[in-house]
Amino acid sequence: MTDCIFCKIISGDIPSNKVYEDEYTVAFLDANPNAPGHTLVVPKRHVVNIFDTDEETLSRTMAAIRKIAPAVRDGVDAHGVHVNSNHGTAAGQVVFHLHFHIIPRHERSEFSFWPKDERAAVDAKTIAEQIRSKLS
Ligand code: AMP
Ligand code: ZN
């Protein structure tokens, strides 16, 4: 994809702090890190997000994440990592090439999760049925 910034990083047309590359994936530091060592893992194949990804691309990317996550953790002497991914504008996706964030964490106090919404817990039986119906 000619106008995709991550495709340009993969091809080397724009620079990045690359930490890993194999036949299917590339990993590089996020330009606006949430913590030192914040790394992005992307498939070389241009897919937008989880909704258009073939299973092989997704599993190759996950296999790379499994390899890279301990190196990110240990590379900055962290104790854990977040593996996060945003899919769709409503979920905060800004770059429309599938990617996973690996964000090192040293202590629980470094971050806050999104707030729970009590209203989201109502009607759980109906919502579960709605989701099941889309899977059948
Ligand atoms: P998302 O909201 O999941 O789509 O996040 C996209 C991420 O890509 C953000 O964390 C950006 O800081 C990061 N990003 C955007 N452009 C670049 C770039 N040229 N090099 C490295 N990271 C980038
Ligand atoms: Zn792309």
Image: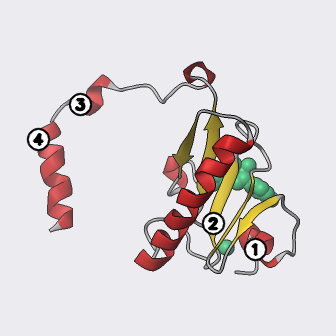
Mark 2 within 8 Å of ligand 2, using the beta carbon? yes
Label drawn at residue 10: 1
Disc 1 is placed on an element classified as helix
Q: Earlier in the sequence, mark 4 or mark 1?
A: 1
Instruction: Look at mark 4 in the image and give the residue it sits on.
Output: 125
Quarter of the picture holding the C terminus: bottom left
Point out residue 68 in the picture as x, y percentages from the top left corner: 62, 56
Please say if 42 is above or below 40: below
Q: Nearer the viewer, residue 87 or 75?
A: 75
Q: Callout 2: few (<14), some (14-19), or many (20+) C-alpha neighbours within 10 Å?
A: many
Q: Nearer the viewer, mark 4 or mark 1?
A: 1
Label drawn at residue 42: 2
- Check disc 2 and give the amino acid type: Val
Q: Earlier in the sequence, mark 2 or mark 4?
A: 2
Point out residue 79 in the picture as x, y percentages from the top left corner: 60, 33
C-beta proximity under 8 Å, tags 2 and 4: no
| Occupied quadrant, residue 109 | top right
Label drawn at residue 121: 3
What residue is rendered at 53% in x and 58% in y?
66
- Check disc 4 and give the amino acid type: Lys
- Measure the alpha-carbon separation of dots 2 and 4: 36 Å
